[in-house]
Image (cartoon, rainbow, N blue to C red):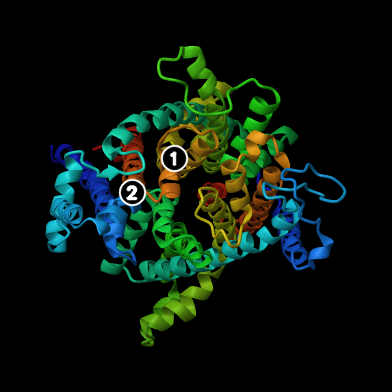
């Protein structure tokens, strides 16, 4: 039966292109202030030659806020993904390699976190911890690991059955040594693909948390811009330039990482089912 | 005979998982305010009541006694459980009403949006996924597949804002948001519900379509598909009975997991549409630092998602002939 799959090379190219584009924004945000439009005294100025993307509710240049927002959105995206992938990998390897009680406990913990809706729980935790950069990273990282754990566990279980592991056990290698020197390098592909997909998810999650008003008000991200557009009436004002650009940026950043992640995943998995598991 | 007895036991064991999960959510709800840094009373009473209680020793004593805050944790947990199952979810200072009343009023508003869009998107997404996953590799199908992936990476609530901008503000076709007034005619209600349901259906369909597309790929490799095709079955009959039927059980369990995510999306969409459901309530609770309301809303949302999961799981077992005795 003929099987249709995207050509990974195309995926790679578009994904990497989009990722480079959003990181270019991050670099541009370090340009000195005179390159951007001046803050004006009138709010909601439409786009013009002096303010390329217009001004927002307090008369700030939207382009400047947008570029600065890329720092927060992308760094939370990356850090959240690092934390969640780290936890997911460790849990997955332990659960997959150690069968029995450890697997059972970690497995049910993973299931529990898979079913409890993550975003509402994140909202509650972030509301208690208070809005700050690190809190958002921790909340995303601590709650977004279950899918990674499940996939790593499945892969680790496969590897546990292979002859070279039996050989290692036979020569008396310690469990931890086998797990991290021999199992880990073999699940690396899954981990990498999951990491890239997790960046995409945490960019979206950060945006969602900031949209609900839990972002750091000192460092507005793209999501914070959407929050202000909702709460300060830019939407009702018809000031589309304040909320269309950040939404496009969030989508492109997340799409870039999804495409790259899917391309990576195609190499390690034979089925396209994984796309359904990516978020 | 024994196999007939085994089946119910199997089901009980399977679904005890969900009971444990529901209990875990209620327990998390109890633990979070008590484990967070800061005064747990602030989180249990909410900011305003806490402020009043600090200045008024009598009130503080009354509240402490009500929640048993001077008792050991285990006793506090029993009081909490007792209150919870009697519908006493605490008091919201920002609304000046018992939380149970607020939720009883707003939960239906969330369900009236999410249930229809879930049903529509399950049907539309499955049909789309089947046709995307099967056979031809035409340009149209590739474009639609790509569109599904793109929709995946767009924030739902942002898309909702765009829809409001275009359809309400520029074209004036739909109301700018909010719930219809009490006792409004069905036409007005539909007008208010139209955009939110369209947005949610679009996003959830893309979701389901991607899953079904993947499952169809897998099933198309099975030998029985080749048999069915060589028998010369009609396309419609074939899709329904040989592609859709075998993929239903795994589809339902995958969809169940995704439902939590879809529900979260709906919560944020409510905020964009100022639709006073659970998501909007959570948003207001965050803004007002009304912790008791926030937590009770979370508990309700989580319990609904868990029950939806249990339901989907039950259906997937009922539809899978292999697990029957």
Camera sees residue A161: no
Across and down, in percent, residue A230 comes to 58, 41
> A56 or B147, which lies in front?
A56
How many badges with numbers are in the image? 2
Disc 2: which residue: B295
Across and down, in percent, residue B46 comes to 32, 52
Across and down, in percent, residue B123 comes to 50, 27
Q: Is residue B168 left or right of residue A60?
A: left
Across and down, in percent, residue B279 comes to 44, 40
Circle 1 crowding by C-alpha within 10 Å: few under 14, some 14–19, many from 20: many
Q: Read off the chain for label 1.
A: B
Residue drawn at the location 40% of the way across and 51% of the way down = B289
Residue drawn at the location 59% of the way across and 52% of the way down = A224
Q: Is residue A112 left or right of residue A246?
A: left
Q: Circle 2 — which element?
A: helix
Disc 2 to disc 1, C-alpha distance: 12 Å
Q: Circle 1 — which element?
A: helix
User: Which one is earlier in the sequence, the residue at label 2 or at label 1?
Assistant: 1
Q: Read off the chain for label 2.
A: B
> A203 or B315, which lies in front?
A203
Disc 1: which residue: B279
């Amino acid at each position: 039966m003929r099987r249709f799959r995207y050509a990974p090379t195309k995926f790679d190219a578009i994904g990497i292109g989009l990722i480079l584009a959003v990181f270019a924004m991050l670099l541009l945000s370090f340009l000195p202030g005179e390159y951007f439009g001046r803050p004006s005294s009138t709010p909601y100025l439409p786009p013009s030659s002096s303010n390329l993307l217009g001004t927002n509710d307090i008369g700030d240049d939207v382009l400047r806020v947008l570029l600065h927002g890329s720092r927060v959105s992308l760094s939370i995206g990356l850090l959240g993904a690092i934390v969640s992938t780290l936890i997911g990998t460790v849990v997955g390897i332990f659960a997959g390699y150690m069968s029995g009680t450890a697997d059972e406990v970690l497995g049910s913990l993973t299931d529990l976190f898979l079913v409890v809706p993550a975003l509402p729980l994140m909202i509650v935790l972030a509301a208690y911890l208070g809005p700050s950069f690190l809190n958002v990273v921790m909340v995303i990282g601590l709650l977004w690991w279950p899918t990674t754990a499940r996939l790593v566990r499945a892969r680790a279980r496969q590897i546990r059955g292979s002859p070279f592991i039996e050989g290692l056990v036979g020569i008396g290698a310690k469990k931890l040594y086998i797990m991290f020197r021999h199992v880990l390098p073999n699940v690396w592909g899954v981990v990498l693909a999951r990491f890239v997909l997790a960046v995409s998810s945490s960019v979206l999650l950060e945006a969602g948390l900031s949209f609900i008003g839990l972002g750091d008000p000192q460092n507005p991200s793209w999501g914070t811009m959407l929050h202000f557009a909702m709460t300060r009436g830019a939407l009702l004002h018809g000031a589309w330039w304040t909320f269309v650009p950040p939404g496009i940026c969030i989508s492109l950043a997340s799409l870039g990482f999804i495409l790259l992640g899917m391309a990576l995943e195609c190499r390690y998995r034979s089925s396209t089912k994984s796309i359904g598991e990516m978020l | 005979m024994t196999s007939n007895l085994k089946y119910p036991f199997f089901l009980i064991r399977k679904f005890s998982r969900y009971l444990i999960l529901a209990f875990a959510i209620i327990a998390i709800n109890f633990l979070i305010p008590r484990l967070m840094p800061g005064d747990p009373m602030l989180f249990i009473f909410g900011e305003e009541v806490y402020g009043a209680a600090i200045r008024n020793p009598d009130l503080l004593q009354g509240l402490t006694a009500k929640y048993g805050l001077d008792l050991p944790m285990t006793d506090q947990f029993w009081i909490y459980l007792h209150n919870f199952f009697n519908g006493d979810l605490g008091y919201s200072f920002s609304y000046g009403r018992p939380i149970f009343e607020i939720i009883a009023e707003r939960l239906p508003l969330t369900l009236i949006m999410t249930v229809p869009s879930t049903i529509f998107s399950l049907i539309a997404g499955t049909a789309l996924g089947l046709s995307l996953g099967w056979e031809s590799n035409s340009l149209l199908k590739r474009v639609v597949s790509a569109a599904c992936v793109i929709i995946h990476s767009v924030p739902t609530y942002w898309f909702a804002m765009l829809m409001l901008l275009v359809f309400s503000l520029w074209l004036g076709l739909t109301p700018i948001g909010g719930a219809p007034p009490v006792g409004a005619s069905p036409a007005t209600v539909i007008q208010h519900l139209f955009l939110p349901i369209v947005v949610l259906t679009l996003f959830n369909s893309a979701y389901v379509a991607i899953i079904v597309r993947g499952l169809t790929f897998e099933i198309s490799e099975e030998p029985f598909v080749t048999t069915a095709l060589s028998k010369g079955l009609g396309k419609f009959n074939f899709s329904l009975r040989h592609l859709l039927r075998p993929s239903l059980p795994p589809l339902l369990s995958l969809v169940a997991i995704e439902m939590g995510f879809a529900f979260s999306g709906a919560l944020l969409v409510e905020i964009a549409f100022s639709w006073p459901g659970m998501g909007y309530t959570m948003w207001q609770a965050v803004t007002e630092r009304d912790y008791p309301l926030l937590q009770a809303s979370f508990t309700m949302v989580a319990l609904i998602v868990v029950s939806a999961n249990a339901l989907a799981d039950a259906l997937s077992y009922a539809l899978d002939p292999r697990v029957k005795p």
